[in-house]
């Protein structure tokens, strides 16, 4: 008995096959092997053809089936993860009307800002938990204003994962988590936001039927079963955006638990057990995968644009050619806590939401030509990234989140002992590192939705913990001194 997960990213599409009883990954693959094309007809635009997601899903699917030798009859449930906040539009024949406007497209910002002003900031934040900003609802408003001939043909709007669900089953459905990331969900009223629909003038019929995050959302159609070599009627039992799904992949379900990633940009995603928001809207808040009307579980998402890209910049421009990231991590460990008074502000990759969308740039403070060397610069960069995470974690704490565990994949910046030890020590949280990914999480989410697993505890019993990093309590004062110095330069 097997579970199948698909992860629809903007760079690639990944498929993963999990053996249900053992929870072990049997096969996984991704396509394309180079980054998927992003169409940018104008500055700030970012679009992709939904058909390219499907084409690459088929390639990844065919690969994992060939690797594993598993038959379609043996797959009992399918789960989907996707790049968040995108917009896919189809007509009554389920034909895509235009390229998808994806998460990093910024054209809709003015529409979200006007909605915030018209609806009212306090009402938006208290009911929607976010500004309408550049999310899916505002992207749909852009289409209405600028492409009326397209808008007039719309039967349904979808998020990227809903489109994949449609291709698998023929059914157009979504979830509360999906609607919340599009800024369509009123958390106080526990229903579609009348304020958003009325302000933008959207027809309620555009909204797909709402299904639970875990549970049967449709069954593989006869045509798709033939196309993919699956069994007709195989249930699609789970779907979620990539960051909530990443948290699920790391078994993050309860208040106080945190999932983190630290690639080019960095994410800290924590679970909140009460409806709350940041009054300055410096973090985003959505329904987590296990949120229900009876049990509040919100995902608070902090994104730092200037994360691994700073480390990458130093590798390209500061250290000698041929130095690897592992070499850099070893060099960083040769510098003491606080980098001998050197501080680096890492915000050199565009505006940062935690700074209220200010674009401050990256800056270096306190450098002394007589005492500082490569090791100090590398460590100061890694500490600066951690301190930006901590700055956001404090915003989360102000919303009522008691942070005690940070779970992460053993990859990217979390491979650095300096990075992870600094994060554990300044946050006071235990860091647990795991071997997992989003497609595997989607597969296990499907297992929960199909009732194959009785609980998330059972689903993730086999999750392999690779390392545990405890806070260095004896050195806490040194970390706090370095953090205070760093904050003084903001």
Image (cartoon, rainbow, N blue to C red):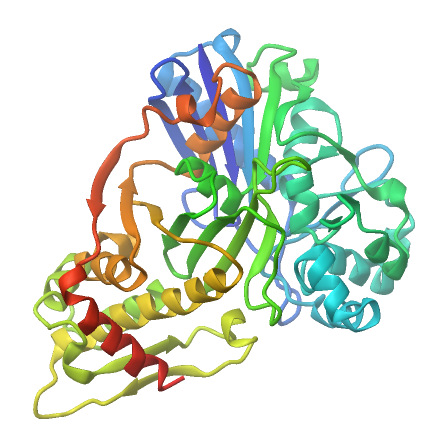
Residue 426 in which image quadrant:
bottom left
Drawn side of residue 275 relative to residue 75, left or right: right
Number of labels in the image equals 0
Quarter of the image with the C terminus in it: bottom left
Residue 222 in which image quadrant:
top right
Q: Nearer the viewer, residue 49 or 256?
A: 256
Which x, y percent locates residue 93? 84, 32
Quarter of the image with the N terminus in it: top left
Q: Nearer the viewer, residue 285 or 382?
A: 285
Which x, y percent locates residue 103? 60, 56
267 relative to 72, above or below: below
445 relative to 134, above or below: above
Q: Nearer the viewer, residue 166 or 244?
A: 244
**What residue appears at the point 43 percent right and 53 percent down from the top-left corner?**
402
285 relative to 234, above or below: below
Q: Residue furthest top?
A: 73
**What residue appears at the point 29 percent right and 39 percent down from the top-left corner?**
434
Q: Is residue 123 visible?
A: yes
Which x, y percent locates residue 433? 27, 43
408 relative to 355, above or below: above
Drawn side of residue 459 relative to residue 484, left or right: right
Which x, y percent locates residue 242? 52, 44
**What residue appears at the point 39 percent right and 53 percent down from the top-left corner?**
403
Drawn side of residue 142 relative to residue 458, left or right: right
Q: Is residue 379 visible?
A: no
């Amino acid at each position: 008995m097997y579970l199948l997960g698909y992860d629809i990213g903007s760079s690639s599409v990944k498929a993963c096959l999990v053996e249900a009883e053992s929870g072990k990954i049997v096969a996984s693959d991704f396509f394309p092997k180079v980054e998927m094309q992003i169409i940018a007809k104008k500055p700030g635009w970012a679009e992709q053809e939904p058909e390219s997601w499907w084409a690459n899903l088929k390639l990844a699917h065919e690969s994992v089936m060939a690797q594993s030798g598993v038959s379609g009859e043996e797959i009992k449930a399918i789960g989907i993860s996707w790049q968040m906040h995108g917009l896919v539009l189809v007509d009554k024949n389920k034909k895509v009307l235009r390229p998808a406007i994806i998460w990093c497209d910024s054209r809709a910002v003015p529409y979200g800002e006007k909605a915030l002003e018209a609806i009212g900031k306090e009402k938006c934040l208290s009911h929607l938990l976010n500004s309408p900003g550049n999310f899916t609802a505002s992207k749909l408003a852009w289409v209405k204003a600028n492409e009326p001939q397209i808008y007039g043909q719309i039967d349904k709007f979808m998020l990227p994962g809903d489109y994949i669900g449609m291709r698998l089953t023929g059914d157009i459905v979504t979830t509360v988590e999906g609607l919340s990331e599009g800024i369509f969900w009123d958390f106080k009223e526990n229903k579609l936001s009348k304020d958003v629909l009325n302000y933008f003038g959207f027809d309620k019929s555009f909204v797909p039927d709402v299904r639970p995050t875990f549970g049967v959302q449709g069954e593989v159609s006869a045509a798709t079963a033939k196309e993919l070599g699956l069994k007709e009627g195989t249930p699609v039992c789970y779907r979620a955006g990539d960051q909530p799904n990443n948290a699920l992949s790391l078994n993050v379900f309860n208040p106080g638990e945190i999932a983190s990633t630290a690639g080019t940009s960095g994410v800290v995603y924590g679970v909140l057990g009460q409806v709350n928001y940041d009054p300055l809207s410096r973090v985003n808040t959505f329904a987590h995968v296990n949120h229900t009307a009876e049990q509040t579980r919100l995902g608070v998402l902090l994104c730092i644009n200037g994360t691994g890209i700073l480390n990458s910049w130093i590798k390209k421009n500061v250290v000698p050619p041929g130095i690897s990231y592992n070499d850099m991590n070893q060099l960083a460990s040769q510098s003491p806590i606080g980098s001998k008074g050197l501080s680096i502000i890492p915000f050199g990759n565009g505006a940062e939401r935690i700074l209220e969308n200010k674009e401050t740039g990256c800056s270096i403070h306190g450098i002394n030509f007589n005492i500082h060397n490569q090791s100090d610069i590398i460590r100061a960069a890694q500490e600066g990234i951690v301190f930006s995470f901590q700055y956001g974690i404090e915003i989360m704490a102000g919303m009522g989140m008691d942070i005690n565990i940070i779970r992460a994949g053993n990859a990217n910046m979390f491979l650095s002992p300096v990075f992870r030890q600094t994060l554990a020590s300044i946050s006071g949280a235990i860091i647990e590192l795991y071997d997992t990914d989003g497609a595997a999480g989607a597969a296990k989410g499907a297992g929960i939705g199909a009732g194959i697993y009785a609980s998330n505890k059972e689903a993730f019993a086999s999750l392999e913990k690779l390392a545990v990093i405890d806070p260095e309590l004896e050195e806490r004062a040194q970390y706090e001194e370095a953090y205070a110095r760093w904050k003084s330069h903001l």
